[in-house]
Image (spheres, coloured by chain):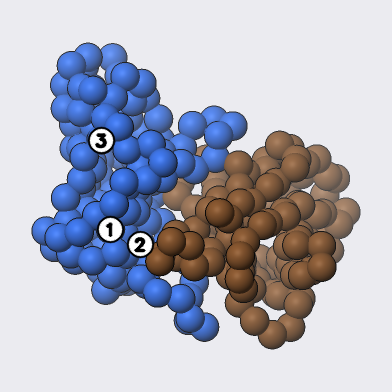
Amino acid sequence: AQSVAQPEDQVNVAEGNPLTVKCTYSVSGNPYLFWYVQYPNRGLQFLLKYITGDNLVKGSYGFEAEFNKSQTSFHLKKPSALVSDSALYFCAVRALSGGSYIPTFGRGTSLIVHP
Amino acid sequence: DGGITQSPKYLFRKEGQNVTLSCEQNLNHDAMYWYRQDPGQGLRLIYYSQIVNDFQKGDIAEGYSVSREKKESFPLTVTSAQKNPTAFYLCASSIAGQGLMDYGYTFGSGTRLTVV
C-alpha cells in the first residue's frame, strides 16, 4: 500500500524568508510525486510533479521540490515567501497499486506567511 | 478552456433527503474521482471511475452512489444513509494510466454541502 505523510499541520514563515513544506512517502515501485495548492473554498491546483530525471523540480509560482529517493522525501521549497503563498498544500504519490494508479494524498499543511 | 465544472457551489440538504452533485469535464480524461474534504483530514476517496459504465468504491463509499453513463459526467448522489454529509466535495479527473504527460489530477472548484 502507498502512503504519504506531511508531518506538519501548519508552517509559519515571515515574508521574504525561505519556506519548506515537508513530505515523505512510501510506495512499491517507482513513484510519481505531486504537489498541489488549495485556496479557501476552491479545488486543488497543480504546482509541480516528479516523474523521472532531475531530482530538483521547478513548478508554478516560484516553487520547487527536491526528490530524495534514499530518504523517500519530496519537500516543497521556495527561496522567498510571499503573503499570497498562504494556503493549504497537499503532497500526493501515485504508483501502480492493485492494477490502478489511484493517488494517495497527504493530510495537507497550512502555510501561513506573515507580513 | 478545458476543465472541470462542479455544480452547485453551495448546497443545503434537509435530513432524509438525497442530493446529487454534478461534475462535468471536457478534458477527454478517462478517469474521474470524487473526494470528500473535512478539516484536518485531507482528501478521502469516495468513488472513482476509470472508464464509462464502470466505477469502484473508494475508502468511504457508504452512503454515496455514482453513475458514469458518459465520459464527460460523473455525478455523485449523497443519500439519506450518509449520516454526516456536511463537507466539501471535490471532483477530479485524470488520464487513466501513467506517463510522462501525467499531471495527476485536474480538480473542480468544489461543492460545499450543508445539512440543515
Residue at horizontal 82 percent and vertical 49 percent from the top: A15
Q: CA distance from mark 2 to mark 1?
A: 9 Å
Percent across and percent down for residue A16 are 85, 55
Q: Position of residue A42 (x, y in %)?
A: 46, 46
Mark 1 to mark 3: distance in Å? 14 Å
Chain A, colour shown: brown
Mark 3: which amino acid? Tyr
Q: Which numbered dot is residue B49?
A: 1
* Earlier-in-chain disc, 1 versus 3: 1
- Mark identifier at residue B64: 3
Q: Nearer the viewer, residue B107 or A52?
A: A52
Depth check, front residue: B7 or A96 = A96
- Tell me the kind of residue under disc 1: Ser
Chain under callout 2: B
In front of the other: label 2 or label 1? 1
> Mark 2 highlights which residue?
B93
Q: Are marks 1 and 3 on the same chain?
A: yes
